[in-house]
Amino acid sequence: MNDQDVRTLEKLAVGVAREAAELALAVRDRVVGDGSVADLPTKSSATDVVTAGDQECEALIRERLGALRPDDVVLGEEGGADAEPAAGQVRWVVDPIDGTVNYAHGLPWFAVSIGAEVDGRALAGAVVEPVSGRVWSAAAGHGAQLDGRTLRASALTRPGVAVVATGLNYDPDRRARQAALVSRIAGRIGDVRRQGCASLDLCSVAAGWVDAYYEHGLHHWDWAAGALIAEEAGAVVRRPSVTDADGLGLEAVLAAGPGIAAELAELLRSLGASGL
């Protein structure tokens, strides 16, 4: 794809994500306006809340993408994969509401995330925050922006003072192992942040709001757009891999400013990250 093509994909991702973000707020007002989640159904555990917003927002995104680009395929959190993409075919990777638990509880830290890729290579992405209205986006080779402002990842070179974001899995056993790693790493870095939305954690790396982010057990839709945004802002990004040559575990996602990325990866490895 040429430069114009990837910018077109970025613009489309932004437009569709904005529309879905408006719908997400409207659905939350209708379904959980009182802030209660006690009567809502769940997926794998009591903390993984299924909301009407997930299904309605993904349905809207699929409808818009299907009308505008009928030859593309979609991989979404709720609806799964349309089909395996053919060589050269665009695949949209969609998280209709990333940060569902925050969303259902009335917390503002959630987002609509839409990424576009071809042959496994990320080309464009958008992450839109419904509450604040902030729009994060990137196109491969064209940098990353927040509301049109160019983003730059942290220039920090001392991991010992780094602010590092992470996340905890819904599975209780895995969450306990991840929490144990947090306790081990906490004394070796500046501080830890846990905000419950992978796409926005990756965007925070892009903005330099945090110096790094790592997490195990994410799905493709959790990081598809955010990882590109962080990368285009100059962060070093490690996506889930088919090999574990670096000892971080097959499912590890790591994004960090270039001055601390290698040292942080080694620290995580030495503290047992591959066991998560």
Image (cartoon, rainbow, N blue to C red):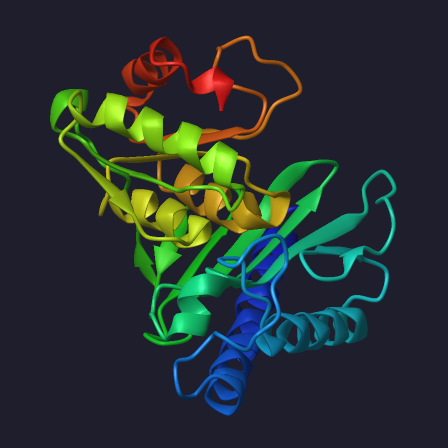
Q: Is residue 251 left or right of residue 106?
A: right
The quadrant in which residue 72 appears is bottom right
Find residue 175 and report its horizontal and vertical position in percent.
Answer: 44, 37
Q: Is residue 126 left or right of residue 105?
A: right
Compare residues 180 and 55 and report the one nearer the observer: 180
Find residue 91 and report its horizontal and vertical position in percent.
Answer: 74, 50
**Image quadrant for the N terminus?**
top right
Q: Residue furthest bottom?
A: 30
Residue for point 44% across, 70% down? 103
Find residue 115 and report its horizontal and vertical position in percent.
Answer: 60, 53
Compare residues 234 and 106 and report the one nearer the observer: 106
Q: Is residue 272 left or right of residue 139?
A: left
Compare residues 232 and 94 and report the one nearer the observer: 94
Q: Is residue 16 above or below residue 263?
A: below
The quadrant in which residue 108 appears is bottom left
The quadrant in which residue 254 appears is top left
Residue for point 48% across, 57% down? 47
Find residue 39 and report its horizontal and vertical position in percent.
Answer: 54, 78
- Residue 141 at least partly seen: no
Q: Is residue 69 above or below residue 56?
A: above
Residue for point 67% across, 20% down? 242
